[in-house]
Image (cartoon, rainbow, N blue to C red):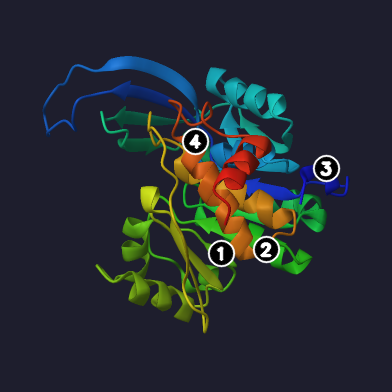
Amino acid sequence: MSPALLPKKGPDVVVVASWNADFSSRVARPPARGETLMGDGFEVSPGGKGSNAAVAAARQGARVAVLARIGRDDFGRMALALWTGEGIDTQSVEQAPNEPSGVAQILTYPDGDNSIVVSPGANAGLGPAQVVAAAPLFGACRVVLASFEVPLPATLAAFRLARAAGARTVLNPAPARALPVELAALVNVLTPNETELATLSGIEGDRDRAAQALLDQGVAAVLVTLGAQGAALYRAGQPVHTVPGHSMTVKDTIGAGDAFNGALAAALARGEPLEVALHWANAAAALSVRARGAIAGMPSFADTAALLQDAPP
């Protein structure tokens, strides 16, 4: 379904969004404790799982609103400029006058993989009161997306509002942590990678058992991202649905998971079945690795559709 066919009222996707300014360097390998390495190609760029996913969803044709908390500083102004430029609704963004915006320190390795340390700054103050104040956003939306980069009470409040409004909920469980029972029951689609899946379930080395354990906790669907190998969808009482990866020349993998989640949310908001939305998300994530940095690689709806036309589901 084309984005042009979407009704023109309210946001389709609400993202309970983290925002970070990304400080990125390329290094030959991870440093050892106490070691100093020479890096290359330092950049400051927009980041944060929620913000990245919001941009990804907007580029896939969804009308997106962000619910976020930023500092009243240069990095906060960077966030507002990005979101406004991408056509994202910022009416529920709070600017904290005496707190820094979040930052992430990223080391990227020659194979495109990376390590990230996040200092949340103003993100840490996002709470239920701000979510409840934004309740009108949830009334017309179709999908609410969050990650573990924002405080759990805010996500719980947002998912409760989403469920009350009949919207679907998508949770990117990163950085990985235990999944509270009360949150599991509110999650329509959980999108861990294999490392996160093991942390969430407490089960190492058995993807099927780990996914089933999360379904048993009340999650409606577990969508495990497998990097270059694609993804696997688990639902109670149904066969596992897998999609293969797409072959790409990798510049770096920063933001690939966020591209996946944003494209998934946009496809679900268009009314695509979960299996079809998975193919869109998988293709968008693959395309995102062709450029350095999270935002530069986020593909458009047309780019993603072209890849799926060449490699149909």
Question: Which residue is labeled 3 in the image?
Answer: 4
- Percent across and percent down for residue 179 are 43, 66
Residue at left offset 47%, top offset 52%: 148
Mark pair 3, 4: CA separation: 23 Å
**Spatial separation of the CA atoms under disc 1 and disc 2:** 8 Å
The vertical placement of 196 against 86, above or below, is below
Q: Are the residues flagged by discs 1 and 2 in contact, CB closer than 8 Å?
A: yes
Check disc 3 and give the amino acid type. Ala
C-alpha distance separating marks 3 and 1: 25 Å
* Amino acid, disc 4: Ser
Name the residue beneath numbered marker 2.
Answer: 168
Q: Amino acid at mark 1?
A: Val
Whether residue 295 is situated above or below residue 130 in the rendered picture:
above
- Determine which residue is flagged by label 1: 189
- For marks 3 and 2, give the one nearer the viewer: 3
At label 4, counting other C-alpha atoms closer than 10 Å, the crowd grade (few under 14, some 14-19, many 20 or more) is many
Q: Which mark is residue 288?
A: 4
- Residue toward you, 106 or 153: 106
Label 2: few (<14), some or many (≥20) within 10 Å?
Answer: many
Q: Amino acid at mark 2?
A: Arg
Percent position (x, y) of residue 290?
Answer: 45, 30
Up/down of 54 relative to 167, above or below: above
State the SS at label 1. strand
Of marks 3 and 2, which one's residue comes earlier in the chain?
3
